[in-house]
């Protein structure tokens, strides 16, 4: 049965929009609706690259690093341009820094990312015989690789259950009321406890386009959102 979502002392509703009846939160139903909602939206960059055939651990590692603070549309084009000439650590090193920076044109901090990618490629060759390491701790030890990049590499490159949390995933799962965390890093830890493992890889694939086009940071489209009857709309004060 639908129920009211209440928050705060004395059972007051959190905001006027939360006075609407809410269905019990069912994560399986959430993902069923998400798949339909994003089916015609532009895909998240790393999943788009995967489906275009760039799914190796090295390509996913490189792509994820390039994607940092860069729009998905730009990330895809930059990666396609780079992968025309370099799809392995040795090929990337053979480019050299100047040519690599040129191939990275359009991404943010192209020079810094070029240096990181060259250092990563050299370590992969020297320490792991040209194979990308498949452990989170080893990936995190690579220059410029943070939790999201490491998780994307494991999830898409190796097919290992891993949760990649960006600003969209962090915002939306907190807005749902599924977790209550202050940072993406803490959201990743909370989701590892709350989210069924079968959704660990998929959550980033669905919530990136959902967050860009529907459940936006400012004036989310709550009135037409397919999750409106489930979402607790935590922190939403100006719904669209």
Image (cartoon, helix red, strand yellow):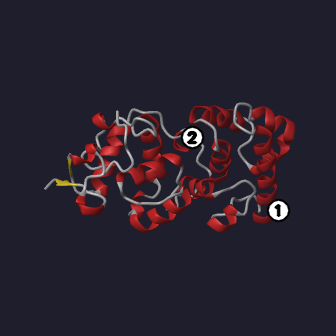
Q: Is residue 91 left or right of residue 153?
A: right
Residue displayed at 29% across by 58% down: 7
At label 2, counting other C-alpha atoms closer than 10 Å, the crowd grade (few under 14, some 14-19, many 20 or more) is many
Q: Earlier in the sequence, mark 2 or mark 1?
A: 2
User: Secondary structure under badge 1?
Assistant: helix
Q: Which picture quadrant has residue 76?
A: top right
Name the residue beneath numbered marker 1. 126
Q: Is residue 229 left or right of residue 82?
A: left
The reply to whether discs 2 and 1 touch (Cβ–Cβ < 8 Å) is no
Residue 162 seen in render: no
Residue displayed at 81% across by 53% down: 119
Q: Is residue 187 left or right of residue 150?
A: left
User: Secondary structure under badge 2?
Assistant: helix
Please identify the quadrant where the C terminus is shown: top left
Farthest-out residue, left: 1
Depth check, front residue: 96 or 144 = 144
Give percent across and percent down for residue 78: 67, 34
Name the residue beneath numbered marker 2. 49
Farthest-out residue, front: 10
């Amino acid at each position: 049965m639908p129920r009211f979502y209440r928050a705060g002392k004395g059972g007051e509703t959190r905001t006027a929009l939360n006075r609407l009846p809410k269905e019990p939160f069912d994560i399986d139903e959430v993902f069923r609706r998400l798949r339909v909602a994003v089916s015609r939206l532009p895909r998240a960059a790393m999943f788009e690259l995967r489906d275009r055939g760039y799914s190796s651990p090295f390509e996913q590692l490189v792509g994820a690093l390039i994607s940092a603070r860069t729009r998905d549309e730009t990330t895809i084009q930059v990666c396609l341009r780079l992968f025309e000439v370099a799809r392995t650590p040795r090929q990337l090193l053979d480019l050299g820094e100047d040519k690599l920076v040129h191939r990275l044109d359009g991404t943010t901090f192209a020079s810094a990312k070029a240096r990181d990618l060259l250092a990563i490629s050299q370590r992969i060759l020297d320490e792991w015989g040209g194979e990308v390491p498949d452990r989170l701790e080893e990936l995190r030890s690579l220059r410029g690789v943070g939790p999201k990049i490491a998780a994307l590499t494991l999830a898409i490159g190796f097919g290992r259950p891993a949760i990649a949390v960006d600003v969209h995933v962090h915002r939306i799962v907190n807005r749902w009321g599924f977790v209550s965390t202050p940072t993406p890093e803490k959201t990743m830890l909370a989701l590892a406890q709350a989210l069924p493992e079968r959704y660990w890889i998929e959550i980033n694939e669905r919530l990136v386009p959902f967050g860009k086009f529907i459940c936006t940071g400012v004036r989310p489209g709550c009135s037409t959102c397919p999750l409106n009857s489930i979402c607790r709309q935590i922190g939403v004060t100006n719904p669209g």
